Image (cartoon, rainbow, N blue to C red):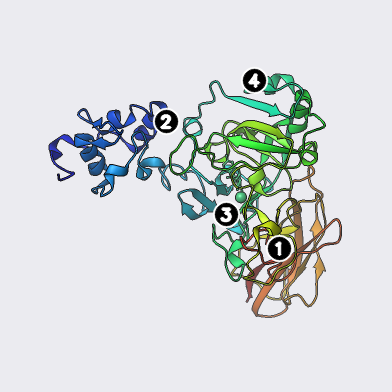
Amino acid sequence: MSHLDGTDDVRPVHTPDEIRRIYAERPHEADWIVFGRRAHADRRGFLKGAGLATMGAMLGATIPFHRNMPAGLMPAAFAQDTGTDLLKEKDGLTVLNDRPLNAETPPHLLDDDVTPYERMFIRFNGLVPQTALDQNAEGWTLTIDGEVENPLTLTIDDLKNNFETVTQRLWIECGGNGRAFFQPGASGNQWTVGAIGCPEWTGVRLKDVLDAAGVKPSAVYTGHYGNDVDLSGDPEKVVISRGVPIEKAMEPENMIAWQMNGQPIPALHGFPLRLIITGYPGSASQKFLTRIWVRDREHDGPKMTGYSYRMPAYPVAPGTEVPESDMEILTVMPVKSLITFPRTGVQVPAGQPAEVRGHAWAGKGDVRAMHVSIDFGQTWQEARLDPPPNKYAWQRWRAEITLPEAGYYEVWARATDQDGVMQPPVVPGWNPRGYANNMMHRIALFAV
Ligand SMILES: Nc1nc2c(c(=O)[nH]1)N[C@H]1C(S)=C(S)[C@@H](COP(=O)(O)O)O[C@H]1N2
Ligand SMILES: [Mo]
């Protein structure tokens, strides 16, 4: 049979937005609703007849393996409207992948002290959940269970009414930020320097909520869950579920947030609730938060095990095949900084002072010092470094440089953490998946 038989019956009648909504709300009837009046599944649940023809017409192609397509599974082609709608208000981000959606911010657009929505990087392992796209928080609950005396199921109002509300600027950096510079390269999003941002979050302390649940002495680790959906569309599949040691979870700066920059958390950043775990890779900061499972052992959810967010337990030569048993969980992010002004490649007047500025941060907490070099690291001048407005916010630094004569220069920027550990000039500690690259940021300047 030709799949496009009876084409007069198969005009697309739903927009991609409608299709996504129907699959989210009525998965069992979705094929029938979306793909036509005469659509019906056969005994094994596979779509055939006019429904299949409609689906083919909407895809603009026949489906050679249509016999294997499960019923009720939205075609991936409709699964996420990428690029257009979702990124509408984002400003100048570089899209690294559109399925799942991943986009980073060029460094010169990260100059704000508080990163605005428009310039906050986006990292997804799966699809943006429909609840977030619809800004629908109705009936949303957060469950705290596992190794606790009183398991809790809290509404957002419970969080707002029963715990102290706090507002803090907290940076989030993807563990894979800087991956693009590793040689040999690692698979995954080729983040350069822009998978970092420091918005202002409002919510409650994770610690207060865990205290209310009463963490048992047997607690070892947390396990975080959200309601985002796997790329396959399979609602049973957990996309990512990471956790942190219970001692880390109990630090007072971690938050369960419902606002970003004074507004409900936008769809792309975790509406309606997200966790913020300070100083750790961004993957610990679960978006669309529905559950925190307090565990009596190291958490083993998706992306917690194997090579995900793990580093070799010892230094290895680039390209080494490291056995899985020698991989350790990446925890505290290394000290790092960015030059956010001026933009790389611009001209500045020779022989005159010019301001260079940016931000510095460290997973351990405050950055101790900031230096810049205009001579490829021969000499260093100390920059003015502001204290953070609160712990785990990034810190503003400024330096005045003078490029002595016309020509090509590079500005290198180097942060030093509390223990005197500095950013390296070259890529540090090669690792199989390309995490935790904190090499110095540098920009090109032409003095004229
Ligand atoms: N539910 C959920 N939470 C998630 C992720 C995800 O894919 N799903 N990605 C994590 C990763 S790897 C990072 S770096 C941050 C990115 O946060 P952002 O997209 O708000 O910038 O979210 C984390 N939380
Ligand atoms: Mo990440």
Residue tagged 4:
157
Residue tagged 3:
105
Is the residue marked by circle 4 packed among few (<14), some (14-19), or many (20+) residues within 10 Å? few
From this view, report whether residue 46 is shown above or below residue 110. Answer: above
Residue tagged 2:
24
- Residue 44: image x %, image y %? 30, 34
Inspect this view and state whether residue 261 appears: no
Q: Earlier in the sequence, mark 1 or mark 2?
A: 2
- Residue 56: image x %, image y %? 24, 43
Secondary element at tag 1: strand
Secondary element at tag 3: loop
* Quarter of the figure with the N terminus: top left
Quarter of the view holding residue 348: bottom right
From this view, report whether residue 113 is shown above or below residue 151. Answer: below
- Residue 99: image x %, image y %? 45, 49
- Distance from disc 3 to disc 1, alpha carbons, whole Å, reads 19 Å
Find out whether the residues at labels 2 and 3 contact each other: C-beta distance under 8 Å.
Answer: no
The residue furthest right is 419
Amino acid bearing label 3? Thr
Q: In this rendering, which labeled residue sits more in front, label 4 or label 1?
A: 4
Residue tagged 1:
356
Q: Is mark 1 within 8 Å of ligand 1?
A: no
Q: Earlier in the sequence, mark 4 or mark 1?
A: 4
- Distance from disc 4 to disc 1, alpha carbons, whole Å, reads 44 Å
Amino acid bearing label 1? Val
* Quarter of the figure with the C terminus: bottom right
Q: In this rendering, which labeled residue sits more in front, label 4 or label 3?
A: 4
- Residue 286: image x %, image y %? 62, 39
Inspect this view and state whether residue 273 appears: yes
- Distance from disc 4 to disc 3, alpha carbons, whole Å, reads 34 Å
Residue at 56 percent across and 33 percent down: it is 271
- Distance from disc 2 to disc 4, alpha carbons, whole Å, reads 25 Å
